[in-house]
Amino acid sequence: MTGSRSGLRSRSSPSPGRSRPGARKRFGQHFLADLNILGRIADAAEIAADDAVVEVGPGLGALTDVLAQRASRVVAVEVDRDLVAVLRERFAPYPGIAIIEADVLSLSPSELLRRGGVRAPYVVVANLPYNIAAAVLRHFLEGDVRPRRMVVMVQREVADAIVAAPGKMGLLSVATQVYGETRMVMRVAPGAFSPPPAVQSAVVRIDVAPAPRVDAPIDVFFRIVRAGFGNPRKQLRNSLSFGLHVQQTVIDDVMRRAGVDETLRPQVLSLDDWAALTRAWVEAMRR
């Protein structure tokens, strides 16, 4: 960021003269107000002085404030036009902060970077409502320009799914971990927000890999994974047979070639297991 960063306000209230907009249920808004947690989120992002940061859902700008003191430029994407007005007034003196009014899912990562006046590499920091968390993660992890790191606050159950190990994995676990290493940063109690949400939250870090972490065609890989988790309570062989529209004898052969036990359920498989199934499936379809 050009100019001094030390003058940025470290509080969450808007500028004098403009009333603070209330949180809107339709956007899942709960404003994070705990300065200690804001600092820990920024620490987890490991922002260097020359880094660009894309912040999704800046709200009233409390985290934007902290990020801007560490990054070269912050591109804050907000869908609520009332909050956009507050953010633009608050941060008008600071050219290193770009406020973009948009639904983040409506713009490709490369377009977001272009509008914000930055280039890759970049880091994503976000406070994501439950109803769009998975979609936003996919948007960046599968996007045309992937970030090198993501630090996101989500509902605790979503965070647990993102970092789950084999034995407790689900579709979201696989779909996230195939693109990078995941780890839990911290749990966040409802009292850290205004207004307090009815659920527990958590912060997760994803260190994004340069390419998908499986030796298999990624489109076929996801077809197999989606079929496998189509009914996670059933044995994997049954879900794959139903989801891929083939006889169980075909799936049994694929699973034997992949070295995967036919009696397993999908949540116990590792990324390598799913990749082996994908390669065996591709081979079977060629015969």
Image (spheres, rainbow, N blue to C red):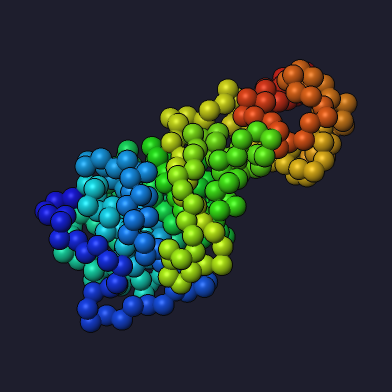
Q: In this picture, is 169 found above or below 70?
A: above
User: Where is residue 87 shown, x and y percent of the image?
Assistant: 29, 67
Q: Quadrant of residue 259?
A: top right
Residue ID at (50%, 47%) = 137
Relative to residue 242, is residue 52 drawn left or right?
A: left
Q: Nearer the viewer, residue 258 or 30?
A: 30
Inspect this view and state whether residue 269 appears: yes
Q: Residue at x 79, y 19 (%)?
A: 256
Query: Which quadrant holds residue 270?
Result: top right
* Residue for point 62% across, 29% down: 271
Q: In percent of the image, x 47 and y 56: which residue is there?
A: 188
Could you say where residue 17 lies in the image, as x and y percent from the top left? 23, 82
**How many tags in the picture?**
0
Would you identify the image quadrant in which residue 222 lies? Answer: top right
Q: Is residue 16 above or below residue 35?
A: below
Instruction: Say left or right for 85 vs 8.
Output: right
Q: Position of residue 163 (x, y in %)?
A: 55, 40
Q: Is residue 216 left or right of residue 180?
A: right
Q: Is residue 29 visible?
A: no
- Left or right, 101 with respect to 223, comes to left
In the image, residue 181 lies at what x, y percent? Answer: 49, 34
The image shows residue 13, relative to residue 240, as above or below, that is: below
